[in-house]
Image (tube, rainbow, N blue to C red):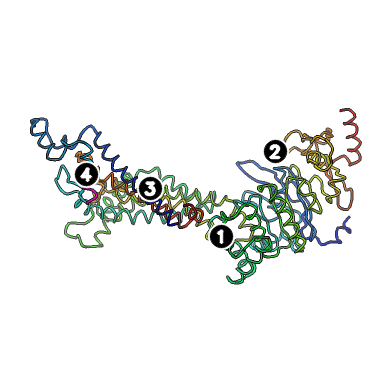
Amino acid sequence: MARYILKRILTAIPMVFLITVLCFALMHFAPYDAIDAMTTPKMSQETINLIKAKYGYDQPVYVQYIRWLDGIMNGNFGYSIVTKQSIASDLAVRLPNTVKLVLPAYLTAYFLAVVLGLLAGANKNKRTDKIIDAISSVGIAVPSFWFAMLLIFALGYKLKILPIVGMHAVGKESSIADFLKHFIMPFLTLTVSFMPANIKYVRSSTLTQFSEDYVMVQRAFGATKSEIMFKHVCKNVLLPVVTRFGMAFRLLITGSIITETVFSWPGVGPYFIKAIQGMDYPIVMIILVLSSTMVILGNLFSDILYCLIDPRIKEMG
Amino acid sequence: MEETLKKKDKILSAADIRTTFHTHGRTVQAVRGVSLYVESGEILAVVGESGSGKSVLMKSVMGLMPDNAEVKADQLTFAGQDMLGMDQEQLRKMRGKEMAMIFQDPMTALNPLKTIGSHLMEVLKRHRGMDKEAAKKEAVAVLNQVGIPSPEKRLGQYPHEFSGGMRQRVLIAMALCCKPKLLIADEPTTALDVTIQAQILDLLKSLQEETGMSIILITHDLGVVASLSHRIAVMYGGLLMEEGTTEEIFYTPKHPYTRALLHAVPKPHSGSKERLEPIPGMAPSLIDPPSGCPFAERCKFACERCTKEIPQYRTYSTTQRALCIYSGEELDHKEGEVESHG
């Protein structure tokens, strides 16, 4: 088993490396570069060259890449072209805000999805199943920004019980009650947007398991419905569901761009959007790298969990 | 007839079992009124092609049909208890304890995430109220009984560490846990290779002799049952076409379908150069079964009456009966005619 895990980790490292190459290359091939964002058409060629030299753009591409990579590895993510602020210290403030929002929302959505999915799958074609399935179908179809608007309209505008924007009211930065008030609507929006696809996934996984032969065999040996469900089906359902959990890691960084933007939540989302609009290449690149690294880490995490749950994988070296 | 049958105890006796499925707005009549019995300590083979309703019949008896199926019967008694009067919970308690069933594909019959030991111990705890220690001991004992070497070690292993034959042995061990009165084996060797098939069948036979339980062996392979079963029931199109002792079925088959089946079995010892005769055509659809004899379309003796009504059983001995308008003699005569013409 240790060998399997080690192998996974060793394959993950070149993947992360490849991602940095890819992100850098894509940005390099983009029609505008950071210099375009900093210069104006009126500037003389000498000035432009000076700026280029200042930021290292006069160097060959591979040198630029190596310098950039070296910076990332040392925690130096570079500086925003627009605000000249350190990206690392910006993210140090914004990332926790995003995590504070996404993590509870995803965990809630995931937990509810497992419960509802199992419930629906175990009651195939009965009323419970039909209701849960219908709700999740509608949920998939509803865009999250629209749902957010509805919440804002109902709770913020009509009933006036919840604040519409931000994470804190001015001057109440340390009040938890105030935070929660701001938290409820974006939290609901995210939970509702994460949940439906997961319900569908758990449900179909449950249906597959219930049609497996071993379920019939267990029935033939007198197992009760709940024994079949909890002692046999559950664990088998969770196998594929674990993969999904790993796939969700990247949401911690870019999982709530729209929701954060709608609610002006001071997380990574609005920061990212603003960077794209302002052609703030260093920020876009870092967030891309972080987000895709989370994908790799998530996969690694699912692989390891898989290995712990499934005896068939333990053997594979 | 009744008197001779009463000499031995009937462990299972069923009258007029009818099983229908409702799928996609259509009704499938999988079993269309089958009566049969199993004596205690005998091996009954239920033979038929795929889709003849033999598996469905047995799952109906076990109460294992899915929700979209409807099972009706005039009588269903097991070991003196009326199963028709039982509720779901009583039936569940019987399953795996008094009657057990093993299935076709041992590769998928075990939960891949559970050890062999926990499969066995779960049954022992459930039906015999054993604690963990006692269950473990007993599990080792039953694994020994079905011929699995070093059972203590095997107990902690997972299904994927077992070969197909070994898994079928594990399932048989699960079935033996509670010393059932009846074991239903649904094509237990179909998914195994030929040498392993023989081993599993030998095992079933010796276990039957050892424990005195009854076995219903479902198979589509007449060759398999010849040396094993005491009696044979032949099914086709959801109906029981013929039943009789193994000798009767092999030496004096009455029904045209039984005869056709026997012509399709290779006889390696006969030395004759006789060609195998396939049965032409396909088994009838059970969605809209023919109103007459289901075999009429493929039967070389069929007349117009055959396609109109389902015939009555003709009784040939205390143990043999067949569902055909013609008697065995009439068919012998007709067969002679067909051959002289052909």
**x then y, percent, for residue B101:** 68, 56
Please, what secondary structure does the residue beneath circle 4 have? helix
> Quick check: do tags 2 and 4 share a chain?
no
Q: Distance of mark 4 from mark 3, alpha carbons? A: 23 Å
**x then y, percent, for residue B313:** 84, 46
Q: Earlier in the sequence, mark 2 or mark 1?
A: 1
Q: Are marks 2 and 1 in contact (CB under 8 Å)?
A: no
Which of the labelled discs sits on residue A11, or is there none? 3
Q: Return the chain for callout 2.
A: B
Please, what secondary structure does the residue beneath circle 3 have? helix
Whether residue B77 appears in this view of the structure is no
Q: Return the chain for callout 1.
A: B
Is residue A292 toward the left or the right of residue A90 in the image? Answer: right
Q: Return the chain for callout 3.
A: A
Q: Distance of mark 1 from mark 4, alpha carbons? A: 51 Å
* Residue placed under numbered mark 2 in the picture: B285
Q: Amino acid at mark 4?
A: Trp
Is residue A40 toward the left or the right of residue A267 in the image? Answer: left
Q: Amino acid at mark 1?
A: Gln
**x then y, percent, for residue A155:** 29, 52
> Quick check: do tags 1 and 3 share a chain?
no
Q: Are marks 2 and 4 in contact (CB under 8 Å)?
A: no
Is B128 magenta? The answer is no
* Residue placed under numbered mark 1 in the picture: B157
Q: Return the chain for callout 4.
A: A
Q: Amino acid at mark 2?
A: Ser
Q: Amino acid at mark 3?
A: Thr
> Quick check: do tags 1 and 4 share a chain?
no
Please, what secondary structure does the residue beneath circle 1 have? loop
